Image (cartoon, helix red, strand yellow):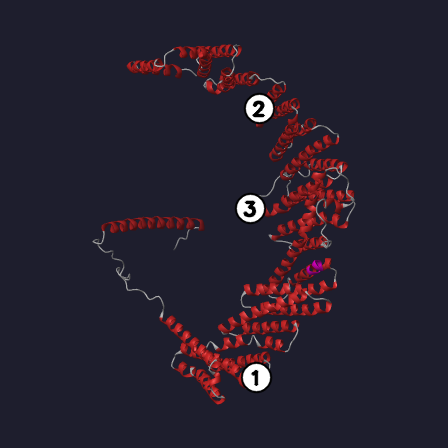
């Protein structure tokens, strides 16, 4: 019995065998490459490579022909037929007048008969390509016969009408000729091509109007579609399909132009009937189309034409503002085909057509939505300049109102309803609901301006919309997960779809709140009321126990703190405070954030509060830059807040920021006091740094003195040393030298490298600074040859005692390496 392993074990075995095969193949390919390189390097004397018996021998090969024999034959036959056709045309047009009527008729008749009869024996002998070429010549001669007949015997007839009759007769004759000689491929497609002309030429000959000519094009397209869908002969089907698409496109374009230019309902109805005919042709072709892709495209085109036909009639009967809603209603009506007995491809095509019209309708509303959304931003340049009369004036600060768009909220609401009701399940459901929410929010955004609500009422409507979207965000986050403290895996497709609707609601909440703030800038009272209300709404949402999802709490916490900072600035401006005084009021926000951050419960909300508080602190610092004493106070208060945050175990690193803020506060205060001595700025940094270094060395005896004391000593010694070289007085060099000597002695006493080297180097450079005048005076009294002589003597001395100096250098290095 065969022991079949489990699927997992069998899959492992297969993977192992495939890996072995890949490895073996890689080895063989590498060996083959090496052998080829060896053979190439050996030159032409190398032994030939013997392949399998079926391989062709290597060596010079005869040149391959670039054209096949059938191809050459077809080219010759086509060229011969074309040349004979050109000769016949030249004979008919040029040499016609040199012969009598009997001779003319005899020549054309004989040549045409011979050309049409010649394919019969050629087909019997198997010369099909030659028969096709001769038959093509015969068909061309029939056209010349028709032309000659009109010029000789029927010249009194109208040329266009005669051409229509001749085209119809030739199409019939060519069809019969192709049916009789069933082995020829050319006559039937040529007959279909000739059939494109009779109706159009007849309408033109009858001086018919534009509607009749358009109808002729559409009827021709319908006949072509019927032929393309019923005939089994591929060349005929291709020519008929090309004719159907070409004449149909021309007819639809002409009908659309007639609909657009219709002066009244009657003309619009006639043009709409033509569009309806085009829609019927497209839908009928889609019903019978063998390929799903073609059926889908034809059904979509049919749906669009049906909507255009109905919309054209409604456009002429309704005011211009209702044209788009009327077309939208027609497009929504197309959705009723879902679940009917129509083929699946037709239903999908009509659904796509409806979707396209709805998308165009929504695009028509976008300029108005953009005006309503972005227009209030211009109040930033005219803040508190006066209360507008209504909502429309509030959004048109520097841009004119867009007339003719009053029906835009109806369009947005209708499409939102369609999205919410059409997709009631499945993966597209979250996307549809998100789109519906966006469109409903846009409707509420534009409605006050369109209805010209009073300014306070518009603020209330926008505020209610913001609260509603915030509630929807919090509720959908909670209901999507079943637990407000957790959320689905956002890395999976299902998790991303589940988070789409609440994320959309949350983004719309923030966008709506920004729009509300911009709208309120027109009035001082409105600004304060809106900022206070938004701060309270977002803060209450962040602390409500029901809505504890981290995403909602993080965003609402940050928004509450941001609007609180803005409220502080607006309050200070309302009280006519100077910016530096407003900065002290803004500092309340980072202080509150620092107090509340560890109590918010989750890491995401904590980080959000801390970042927003830090941004508010930077805002306060920026406001206080115009007054140095107040700036020093603000920096110090920020340092206090940062130090309080650093008390927490997980925020120890904030202590570095607190130290920097305290140092900056001290420096700004010294600058305000016009203190210019660098030691006043460096010593407040050096002393704490040395104390911290001492604590570090006490806890970790292996810590380097450069890490513990190097930064603190460098902060004071280096700036003071630079100041000494530019100072002509004696107190600074004396004090710096004494301090450097003390640091050097401490390094010697405790055998610390950093104090010893930094202190010694500073002491040496300070001494050189003090001796520099005397050295310069002595150099002026020394002859010019003395320095080179001294340098040469020094080099000789160093060269003579080189080995001893190296020994001393090694001893000094060993001594310094023992220091820490």
In the picture of the structure, the residue carrying the numbered disc 3 is 492
In depth, the one of 692 and 762 nearer the eye is 762
Relative image position of residue 773 (x, y in whole percent): 45, 11
Predominant secondary structure, magenta span: helix
Label 1 environment density (alpha carbons within 10 Å; few <14, some 14–19, many ≥20):
few
- Residue 408 visible in rendering: yes
In depth, the one of 142 and 725 nearer the eye is 725
Label 1, secondary structure: give it: loop
Q: Using residue 37 as the reference point, say whether residue 250 is left or right of it.
A: right
Question: On residue 604, which mark appears?
Answer: none
Range of magenta residues? 323-327
- Viewer-side label of 3, 1: 1
Q: In this view, does 500 lie above or below 189?
A: above
Q: Label 2 to label 1, Cα distance in Å?
A: 106 Å
Label 3, secondary structure: give it: loop
Relative image position of residue 149 (x, y in whole percent): 53, 84
* Contact? badges 3 and 1 (CB < 8 Å): no
Residue at far bottom of view: 102
In the picture of the structure, the residue carrying the numbered disc 1 is 155
In the picture of the structure, the residue carrying the numbered disc 2 is 660
Q: Is residue 378 inside the magenta stretch?
A: no
Q: Label 3 to label 1, Cα distance in Å?
A: 79 Å
């Amino acid at each position: 019995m065969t022991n079949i392993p489990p699927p997992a074990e069998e899959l492992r075995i297969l993977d192992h065998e495939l890996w072995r095969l890949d490895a073996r193949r890689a080895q063989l390919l590498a060996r083959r490459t090496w052998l080829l390189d060896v053979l190439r390097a050996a030159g032409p004397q190398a032994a030939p490579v013997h392949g399998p018996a079926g391989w062709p021998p290597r060596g010079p090969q005869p040149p391959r022909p670039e054209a096949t024999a059938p191809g050459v034959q077809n080219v010759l036959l086509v060229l011969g037929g074309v040349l004979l056709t050109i000769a016949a045309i030249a004979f008919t047009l040029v040499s016609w007048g040199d012969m009598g009527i009997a001779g003319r008729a005899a020549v054309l008749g004989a040549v045409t008969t011979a050309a049409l009869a010649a394919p019969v024996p050629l087909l019997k002998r198997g010369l099909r390509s030659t028969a096709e070429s001769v038959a093509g010549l015969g068909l061309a001669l029939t056209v010349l016969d028709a032309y000659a007949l009109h010029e000789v015997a029927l010249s009194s007839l109208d040329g266009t009408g005669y051409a229509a009759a001749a085209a119809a007769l030739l199409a019939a004759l060519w069809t019969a000729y192709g049916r009789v000689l069933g082995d020829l491929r050319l006559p039937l497609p040529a007959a279909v091509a000739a059939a494109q002309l009779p109706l159009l030429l007849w309408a033109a000959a009858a001086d018919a109007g534009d509607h009749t000519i358009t109808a002729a094009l559409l009827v021709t397209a319908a006949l072509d579609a019927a032929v393309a869908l019923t005939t089994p002969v591929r060349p005929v089907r291709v020519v008929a399909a090309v004719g159907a698409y070409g004449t149909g496109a021309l007819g639809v374009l002409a009908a659309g132009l007639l609909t657009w230019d219709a002066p009244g309902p009657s003309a619009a109805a006639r043009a709409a009937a033509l569009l309806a005919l085009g829609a019927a042709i497209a839908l009928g072709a889609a019903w019978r189309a063998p390929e799903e892709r073609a059926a889908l495209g034809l059904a979509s085109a049919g749906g669009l034409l049906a909507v255009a036909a109905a919309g054209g009639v409604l456009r002429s009967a309704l005011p211009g503002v209702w044209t788009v809603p009327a077309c939208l209603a027609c497009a929504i009506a197309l959705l009723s085909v879902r679940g009917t007995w129509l083929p699946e491809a037709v239903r999908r095509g009509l659904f796509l057509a409806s979707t396209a019209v709805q998308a165009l309708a929504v695009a028509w509303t976008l300029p108005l939505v953009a005006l309503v959304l972005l227009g209030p931003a211009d109040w930033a340049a005219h803040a508190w300049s006066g209360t507008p009369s209504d909502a429309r004036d509030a959004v048109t600060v520097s841009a004119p109102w867009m007339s003719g768009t009053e029906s835009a909220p109806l369009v947005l609401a209708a499409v939102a309803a369609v999205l919410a009701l059409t997709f009631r399940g499945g993966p597209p459901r979250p996307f549809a609901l998100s789109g519906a929410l966006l469109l409903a929010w846009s409707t509420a955004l534009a409605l006050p301006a369109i209805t010209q609500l009073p300014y306070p009422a518009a603020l209330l409507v926008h505020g209610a919309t913001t609260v509603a979207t915030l509630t929807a965000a919090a509720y959908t986050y909670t209901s999507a997960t079943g637990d407000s403290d957790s959320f689905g895996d956002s890395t999976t497709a299902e998790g991303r779809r589940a988070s789409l609707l609440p994320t959309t609601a949350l983004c719309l909440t923030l966008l709506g709140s920004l729009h509300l703030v911009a709208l309120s800038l027109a009035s001082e009272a409105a600004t304060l009321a809106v900022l206070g209300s938004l701060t309270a709404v977002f803060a209450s949402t962040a602390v409500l126990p029901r809505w504890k999802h981290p995403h909602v709490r993080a965003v609402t916490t940050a928004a509450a703190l941001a609007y609180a900072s803005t409220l502080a600035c607006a309050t200070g401006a309302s009280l006519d405070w100077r910016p530096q005084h407003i900065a002290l009021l803004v500092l309340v926000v980072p202080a509150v954030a620092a107090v509340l951050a560890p109590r918010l419960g989750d890491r995401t909300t904590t980080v959000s509060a801390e970042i927003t508080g830090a941004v508010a602190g930077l805002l306060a610092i920026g406001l206080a830059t115009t007054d140095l004493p107040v700036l020093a106070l603000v920096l110090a208060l920020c340092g206090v807040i940062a130090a309080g945050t650093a008390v927490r175990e997980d925020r120890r690193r904030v202590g570095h920021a607190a130290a920097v803020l305290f140092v900056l506060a001290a420096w700004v205060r010294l600058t305000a006091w016009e203190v210019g001595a660098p030691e006043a700025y460096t010593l407040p940094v050096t002393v704490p740094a040395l104390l911290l270094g001492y604590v570090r060395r006490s806890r970790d005896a292996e810590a380097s003195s450069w890490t513990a004391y190097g930064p603190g000593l460098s902060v004071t010694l280096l700036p003071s040393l630079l100041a000494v070289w530019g100072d002509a007085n004696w107190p600074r060099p004396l004090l710096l030298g004494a301090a450097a000597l003390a640091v050097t002695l401490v390094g010697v006493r405790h055998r610390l490298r950093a104090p010893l080297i930094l202190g010694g180097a500073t002491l040496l450079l300070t001494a050189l600074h003090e001796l520099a005048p005397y050295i310069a005076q002595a150099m002026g009294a020394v002859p010019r040859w003395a320095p080179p002589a001294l340098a040469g003597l020094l080099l000789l001395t160093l060269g003579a005692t080189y080995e001893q100096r190296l020994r001393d250098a090694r001893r000094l290095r060993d001594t310094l390496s023992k220091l820490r």
